[in-house]
Amino acid sequence: MKQDLFTKHWNIYQEIIARNYMQHREFGEEIRQVLDRRFPDQPLRVLDLGCGDARQMADQLKGRAVESYTGFDLAGPALVLAQKNMQGLAQEVQVREGKMEDWITREEGAFHLIYSSYAIHHLSDPEKKALLAEVRKKLAPGGLFILIDTYRTGGESREEYLDTYLKQNLDQWATLSAEQKGLVRDHIVNYDFPAILRDMMEWAGEAGFELEESPVYDRFHRMMVLSEGLTESHPIS
């Protein structure tokens, strides 16, 4: 039953990605450009927080020198897929089942690229803040933290965010069946706790990050490219 439920949810998420409902296509192209500029030839040590099946990260790493890939996720079945998707792309592949906020405190190495896509909004705000501090500790000199997630606007309550997000996004995802939309709705209502964007940036600054760029395609989904060594954060638009 557990495997059946995982497969059902995972198939829905793959449809969301394929239809580009959450801007995966645009963010993927942005990531390729960032990696081309910052790490054209450097062998990378990569940490993926909430990696799922690692399919998106595998696409970004194709053709690059990858020394190691480490992925954390709660879903064991997803990690089996992640191991397969990363084989042949990285010299060393490690996946760990459990909470990313726990596993990162146990990591002893440093990473050139730390990546997280639509995972951190599942944490409470204190957990998000603590995770940012841990990510900063694990970032190698010259490294980047690429964070893709959903956010609330300033002053917007979680209830207001949920109402707006569901109406402007989920209700418009036409290729999902009524049953699939119901499963997505239940997940969002029960497990999504997006931070206010400016709060997230403040916590990143306190952790020692500098915002290098933050492409915006819609009001809900955002990618941030954060580097070490904050001097003065860039304005958020």
Image: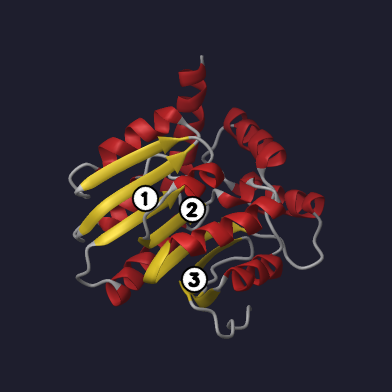
What's the residue type where badge 3 is placed?
A: Leu
Q: Residue at x 45, y 26 (%)?
A: 7
The answer to which of 128 and 237 lies nearer the viewer is 128
Q: Residue at x 23, y 72 (%)?
A: 40
Residue 203 visible? The answer is yes
* Distance (Cα) linking label 1 and label 3: 19 Å
Residue carrying label 3: 226
Q: Is residue 165 left or right of residue 148?
A: right
What's the residue type where badge 1 is placed?
A: Gln
Q: Residue at x 48, y 40 (%)?
A: 13
Tell me the element at label 1: helix
> Residue 91 at x, y = what percent?
19, 49
Residue 147 visible? The answer is no
Q: Residues within 10 Å of mark 3 (few under 14, many from 20)?
A: many
Task: Give residue 138's mark.
Answer: none
Q: Is residue 106 left or right of residue 60?
A: right
Task: Give residue 56's mark.
Answer: 1
The answer to which of 152 and 147 lies nearer the viewer is 147
Q: Is residue 180 left or right of residue 58?
A: right
> Residue 19 at x, y = what percent?
45, 49
Callout 1 touching callout 2 (CB < 8 Å): yes
Q: Residue at x 54, y 79 (%)?
A: 230
The structure's colour scheme is secondary structure
The answer to which of 82 and 91 lies nearer the viewer is 91
Q: Quadrant of the C terminus?
A: bottom right
Tell me the element at label 3: strand
Task: Give residue 117's mark.
Answer: 2
Callout 1 touching callout 3 (CB < 8 Å): no
